[in-house]
Amino acid sequence: MGSGNGGKKIAVGNSTRYQDGSSYMSRRRFISALAALGATQLMPAHRVGQNIRPAMGTAPALRIMDIHHHLLPPRYVAARKADILKVSTSPSVIDWTPEHSLDVMDSSGIQTAFVSVSTPGIWFGDVEEGRRLSRECNDFAAQMAKDHPGRFGFFAAAPLPDTDGSLKEIEYAMDTLHADGIGLVTNYEGKYLGDPAFAPLFDELNRRKAVVYVHPTSTACCWNIVPNIPISLEEFGFDTTRTITSLLYSGTLSRCADCKFIFSHGGGTIPMLAGRIGGGARQLTRLVPHGPDYEFQKLYFDTASAANAPAMAAILKLVSVSQVMFGTDYPWGNVGNALKALESVGLSEREIRAIKYESALRLFPRLKA
């Protein structure tokens, strides 16, 4: 998670944007858009900027796929505003709207953003609330995709550790809403994803050959270990590593071979620790029959907070570039900085092209249409 929508305004070319990469409509852009739409009268004040996309020639061609993009539906924010702000370094994220996402996508050349619920997720210890929040978030995401064809995909939330409720929500999200996959966080009440309690969920996802998108959170034991250090800086990466290790050592990665796992932030510290972690798993031949390296090399990663030379070098030593996808972490992350970082790492044009959109198109072929 990074800085959120808002903050100091800065000039960028002919438009104006916030420091975190979000944008608002400048007077010039507003006039150009009205002209392009053939508007004959001024819009009501409360609608200015809501439905206007950039005029022709003012934005880059749309091609990039953002696999790591978050939504904050109004009912979710209303229900859990304090919890969201507890883990956020940018209070303005709660002001997010689909139009904010579309603005920054248009100005950055992002064709499609796959939205998911970020930390703190939708589980707060109450079964009925978890089921209600997951349904509300999933319905909201599906409506976004319907309202803006081709612009949004989504990973549906599931109310783990409520396994029964999660199985029901998966059925609804995949069969009725046509979600692109299921979005989970790295642990639920201290239980990592390889926990036996979650086996029925992963068996069903495997049966469906589903994409499973995993975003980090933290456990209660690891908050404020070092004073004044946000959990996103270190613990998110460590928690991703713990849950991948849990999936490996439980045999879930081997058993659920048809699931496609995407881990955000470059897989945490897995690219650096794969050899050490895999060394122990080599003793678990029954649960990891093909070996740990085989399982690690099947994983997918996004580049949010990982588009730097050391991290990318480690990631691309572990997996093929076809398993690395662009991610921004918007509205916490800065979209402009994410693109700039990827383009300055020293990758080849072919590798950048693969990360920006080819890898996602391969995993989500519906976007080729």
Image (tube, rainbow, N blue to C red):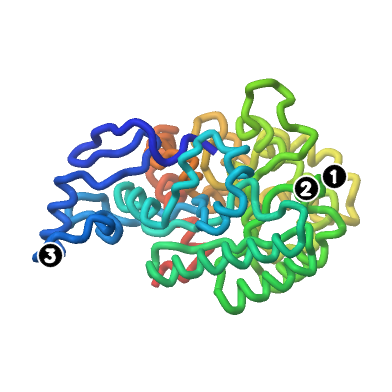
Of labels 2 and 3, the one closer to you: 3
SS for dot 2: helix
Q: Is residue 70 above or below residue 316?
A: below
Is residue 53 in view? no
Q: Give how far apart the Cα atoms at labels 1 and 2 are.
A: 6 Å
10 Å neighbourhood of mark 3: few (<14), some, or many (≥20)?
few
Give residue 293's position: percent from left, percent from top: 73, 47
Q: Earlier in the sequence, mark 1 or mark 2?
A: 1
- Find residue 39 and name its label: 3
Of labels 1 and 3, the one closer to you: 3
Q: Earlier in the sequence, mark 1 or mark 3?
A: 3
In the image as oriented, which residue stretches furthest toward the bottom?
A: 176
10 Å neighbourhood of mark 1: few (<14), some, or many (≥20)?
many
- Residue annotated with mark 1: 281
- Residue annotated with mark 2: 292
Task: Locate residue 361 relative to residue 228 in the image: left or right.
Answer: left
Give residue 310's position: percent from left, percent from top: 55, 29
Task: Locate residue 204 relative to residue 99 in the image: left or right.
Answer: right
SS for dot 1: helix
Check if mark 1's residue and mark 2's residue have beta carbons within 8 Å: yes
Callout count: 3
Q: For the point 25% across and 59% down, which residue is it? A: 52
| Residue type, numbered disc 2 | Pro
Q: For the point 62% across and 46% down, which residue is it? A: 119
Q: Give how far apart the Cα atoms at labels 2 and 3 are.
A: 60 Å
Q: For the point 51% across and 65% down, which residue is it? A: 140
Q: Give how far apart the Cα atoms at labels 1 and 3 are.
A: 64 Å
Check if mark 2's residue and mark 3's residue have beta carbons within 8 Å: no
Q: Is residue 225 above or below residue 242?
A: above
Task: Locate residue 131 relative to residue 312 in the image: left or right.
Answer: right
